[in-house]
Image: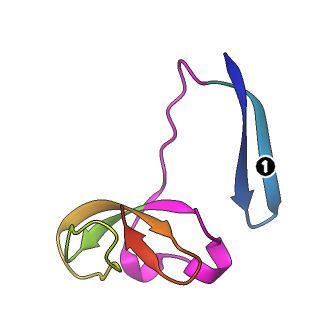
Amino acid sequence: MAVPYVFKTQAGPLLLSQLDANFAALSPANVTVATLPSAVTAGTGAVMFVIDATATTFASIVAGGGANPVPVYSDGNNWRIG
């Protein structure tokens, strides 16, 4: 089943209308906390993957300098683990 996906990019929205949900995997970029874009700029719902979180507690605000790889999401103001 093909489903539409819309991604926010710096150049504007990117629509991938023929991405097959049965075979596709989305891989967020692996970055350090220090190199995350602003959560405000990224917007609510943006997802990244950091490689240096100090904690792994779900929904806590992420801090860098640790050794934990975790997914993070923007709540519109902060990057949170999850």
For residue 61, above or below residue 25: below
Going by the numbered disc 1, the residue's amino acid type is: Leu
Residue name at image x 79 percent, y 42 percent: 15
Quadrant in which the C terminus is drawn: bottom left
Question: Could you tell me residue 51's position as x and y percent?
Answer: 29, 65
Question: Could you tell me residue 44's position as x and y percent?
Answer: 61, 69
Would you say residue 10 sits in the magenta stretch? no
Would you say residue 28 sits in the magenta stretch? yes
Residue name at image x 54 percent, y 27 percent: 24
Q: How is the image coloured?
A: rainbow
The residue nearer to you, when weighing 75 against 52, is 75
Task: Give the quadrant of residue 50.
Answer: bottom left
- 73 horizontally vs 37: left or right: left
The residue nearer to you, when weighing 44 against 36, is 44
For residue 42, above or below residue 63: above
Task: Give the quadrant of residue 31.
Answer: bottom left
| Crowding near the residue tagged with mark 1, few <14, some 14–19, many ≥20 C-alpha atoms within 10 Å | few
Question: Could you tell me residue 35's position as x and y percent?
Answer: 46, 78
Question: Could you tell me residue 54's position as x and y percent?
Answer: 20, 77
Q: Which residue is mark 1?
A: 14
For residue 47, above or below residue 16: below
* Stretch in magenta: 21-48
- 53 horizontally vs 78: left or right: left
Quadrant in which the N terminus is drawn: top right
